Structure formats: C-alpha cells, structure tokens
Image (cartoon, grey):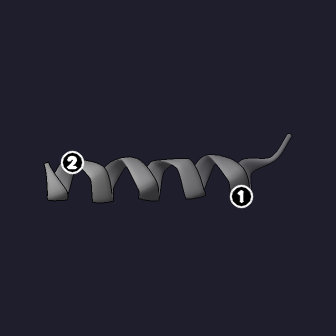
C-alpha cells in the first residue's frame, strides 16, 4: 500500500482545483 503516493495525488488534485 503506497499511502504516500495517495497523498501526493491528493495534493496534485487540490492544486489543479485551485488553479482551475
């Protein structure tokens, strides 16, 4: 289980939502 990768994905999604 790569929870770190999950957190990274969440951060990217947050940035994308903030930008868009």
Q: Is residue 15 left or right of residue 2?
A: left
Q: Quarter of the image containing the N terminus?
A: top right
Residue at 71% x, 58% y: name it: 4
Disc ID at residue 12: none
Q: Give SS at disc 1.
A: helix
Q: Which element carries disc 2, helix, strand or loop?
A: helix
Q: Nearer the viewer, mark 1 or mark 2?
A: 2
Please report the residue visible at 63 percent of the width from the left and 46 percent of the height from the top: 6
Of 12 and 4, the residue lying toward us: 12
- Sooner in the amino-acid sequence: mark 1 or mark 2: 1
Residue 12 quadrant: bottom left
Q: Residue 17 — which label?
A: 2
Q: Residue furthest front?
A: 20
Circle 1 residue:
4
Residue 8 lies, in percent from the top left, at: 58, 58
In the image, residue 19 lies at what x, y percent? 17, 58
Q: Position of residue 7 (x, y in %)?
A: 58, 55
Q: Residue at x 54, y 48 (%)?
A: 9
Q: CA distance from mark 1 to mark 2?
A: 20 Å
Q: Residues within 10 Å of mark 2 (few under 14, many from 20)?
A: few
Q: How many discs appear? A: 2
Q: Is residue 12 left or right of residue 3?
A: left
Q: Residue furthest right?
A: 1
Q: Residues within 10 Å of mark 1 (few under 14, many from 20)?
A: few
Asked if residue 18 lies left or right of residue 8, the reply is left
Percent across and percent down for residue 10 are 46, 49
């Amino acid at each position: 289980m790569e929870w770190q990768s999950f957190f990274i994905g969440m951060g990217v999604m947050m940035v994308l939502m903030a930008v868009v």
